[in-house]
Image (cartoon, rainbow, N blue to C red):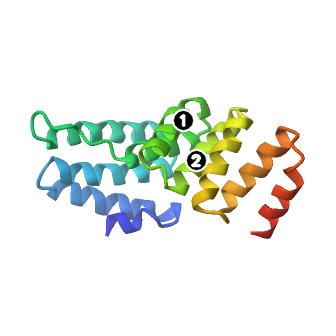
Amino acid sequence: HGMALVATVTERLEESRTVLEAALALAPDARAKAMVKIQLGWVASKQGRVDDALALVAETRALLAKAVKPGDKVPNPPVLDAVAADALARVWRWEEAIAPAKSCTETAPQNSTAWVVYARVLGSVGDNAGALAAATKGLEFAPRDQDLLRTQASALAALQRPEASAALAAFDRF
């Protein structure tokens, strides 16, 4: 229920937070607590509480480390980097968002949303060639994604490439 509420409008995110905090109190083990904590991280990110979101990502990583058997590899699910990148991007901390956004594309290479965030972050730091490459990769998975099409058009225009007007037309079309 709390996970579903994370997708609600910002004004109602406290409902999600309340449900998730109740779930956290009942979580039976480190893995379950990690699952709830990262959802709380999404809530914090969406509320612009970047330091809280990053702290929840760190707490989730620690819980995941506790949840594995000795000698097993600690999991690094892409959602951890997605929350960190999202939280940093929401408050325009673009330089800091590069590493988690890139990591998310590496651990979830077919996730178009990961490519959206990475392309936006690169474009925001002025790496137009990188933004174009990231948008192009993301468009392989979601050819009509408005955010990727917009980033592609913006990057092509910034690079003064002749395809810029066609890319802008594609963005307008979709």
Q: Which residue ends up furthest to the top in the rendered image?
A: 95
Residue 166, percent from left and from top = 86, 58
Q: Amino acid at mark 1?
A: Ala
Q: Report whether residue 62 is seen.
A: yes
Instruction: Determine crowd level at label 2: few under 14, some 14-19, many 20+ residues with C-alpha closer than 10 A.
Output: many
Q: Amino acid at mark 2?
A: Val
The quarter holding residue 53 reads top left
Residue 169, percent from left and from top = 85, 62
- Residues at marks 1 and 2, CA–CA distance in whole angstroms: 9 Å
State the count of labels: 2
Instruction: Determine crowd level at label 1: few under 14, some 14-19, many 20+ residues with C-alpha closer than 10 A.
Output: many
Q: Which sits in the foreground, 31 or 168?
A: 168
First in sequence: mark 1 vs mark 2 = 1
Q: Which sits in the foreground, 125 or 27?
A: 125
Q: Is residue 165 above or below residue 84?
A: below
Q: Is residue 107 above or below residue 168?
A: above
User: In the picture, which quadrant includes the C terminus?
Assistant: bottom right
Residue at image mark 1: 97
User: What residue is shown at x 86% (from left), y 50% (from top)?
Assistant: 164
User: Which mark is on residue 117?
Assistant: 2
Give the structural element (helix, strand or loop) at label 2. Answer: helix
User: What residue is shown at x 52% (from left), y 38% (from top)?
Assistant: 102
User: Which mark is on residue 116?
Assistant: none
The quarter holding residue 1 reads bottom left
Q: Report whether residue 49 is seen.
A: no
Give the structural element (helix, strand or loop) at label 1. Answer: helix
Q: Is residue 115 left or right of residue 169?
A: left
User: What residue is shown at x 66% (from left), y 43% (from top)?
Assistant: 133
Residue 76, percent from left and from top = 32, 42
Residue 55, percent from left and from top = 36, 36
Query: Are the residues tagged 1 and 2 within 8 Å (C-beta)?
Result: yes
User: What residue is shown at x 46% (from left), y 42% (from top)?
Assistant: 106
